[in-house]
Amino acid sequence: MNRVIIDIGHPGHVHLFKNLARMLADKGVKVLFTLREKEFERELLQAEGFRFKSFGKHYKSLSGKIWGLVKFDLQMFLTGLRFRPGLFISHGSIYAAHAAFLLRRKHLSLEDSGNMEQIVLYRPFTDAILTPDVLPEQLGDKQIRYEGYHEIAYLHPDFFKPDPSVYEWLGLEQGERYAIVRFVSWNATHDVGHKGLTNEDKVKLVEQLSKQVRVFITSEATLPPELQPYRIRILPEKLHHALSFATIVVSEGATIASEAGVLGTPAIYINTIARSYCQDQERFGLVYNTSDSARVFSLVDEILAQDREVFRDRRNKLLSEKINVTRYLYDFVNDRYGNGQSPK
């Protein structure tokens, strides 16, 4: 295994695999990232200095997704044919799984969402599926569970050091209290039939937060006019530093809520889609899960009234019970595929 393709389907996947990619590269493995451009995947890969190949824009419509399945499968196959990887790695990528099968290579998948409509399309062509032990879905004999979450792979203190200069970038005084609010677009396949806050509740939430802290909104969705002044485009490479020093995070997206929790920042996850890793972090008092707007408003006051250090202590307890996910993944790849030969 001297060449690896890592396929990216979401900005969070860049973070998930970046430390593994560097550790493999340090051992002489050539790594190529592939992506569809959905949000800021390209910018993240550029900022990290990785070699990558873009397959173009991600399709949002149903007809576009169907066409994309054909188009991106073909592009992935051709890329694999030219690059000749010994292994494909992804977070549940249908395209990587199909290409690996056609090229008679192995595909290793990480999975933490349990979206069966995607899993059934890649599982038959996948060698192993690594999942957090808290994932409730039973994925068959290819599933291997570990004690951790994806977010630990890149936010573990062995790999991530918060940079306090983010205060200056945000235009804040050092130590000034602030909130990060994240709204999603609700156009992913797994979002069908689910919801977060109404526009009215979004306005009410920001008004409530603004009485005690500075508010910064990052949003995939169009914001009501009264919330536009709070909108900020947080540079991808600065996001985790901003989450680390925030007083509170309120998010319709599970990834940012979980990232905040792993960093020791209290978060409220507002979504009717239950995510097992966010639910597990509630056990530590770090991520609060609800789709009830009234509960959100009461939680905001409850969290802001607590000492920030309480949550950092809870984070330390969480990390003491979980593994270093990147080191586990690196060892797994080496033990299973790293015999110096391209796995057949």
Image (tube, rainbow, N blue to C red):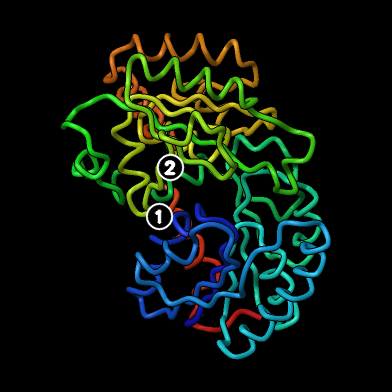
Q: Residue at x 39, y 69 (%)?
A: 46
In the picture, residue 265 is in which quadrant? top left
Where 94 falls versus 213 (above or below)?
below
Q: Give the residue type at disc 2.
A: Ile
* Residue beneath disc 1: 327
Asked whether 155 or 194 is in front, the reply is: 194
Image side of residue 320 versus residue 171, left or right: right
Where 288 falls versus 48 (above or below)?
above
Asked whether 279 or 197 is in front, the reply is: 197
Asked whether 37 or 154 is in front, the reply is: 37
Residue 36 at x, y percent in the picture: 60, 67
Look at the numbered disc 1 and give the secondary structure of its residue: helix
Image side of residue 70 versus residue 282, left or right: right
Image side of residue 82 versus residue 306, left or right: right
Q: 10 Å neighbourhood of mark 2: few (<14), some, or many (≥20)? A: some
Q: Which residue is most to the bottom? A: 82
Q: Residue at x 41, y 29 (%)?
A: 318
* Residue beneath disc 2: 323
Residue 215 at x, y percent in the picture: 37, 28
Q: Residue at x 55, y 67 (%)?
A: 336
Residue 255 at x, y percent in the picture: 52, 41
The answer to whether the residue labelled 1 contacts the one labelled 2, judged by CB atoms less than 8 Å apart, is yes
Q: Which residue is most to the left? A: 174
Q: Give the residue type at disc 1.
A: Arg
Look at the numbered disc 2 and give the secondary structure of its residue: loop
In the picture, residue 190 is in which quadrant? top right
Image side of residue 139 versus residue 249, left or right: right
Q: Residue at x 34, y 21 (%)?
A: 311
Quadrant housing the C terminus: bottom right
Residue 200 circle label: none
Q: How far separated are the C-alphas under marks 1 and 2? A: 8 Å
Residue 214 at x, y percent in the picture: 32, 26
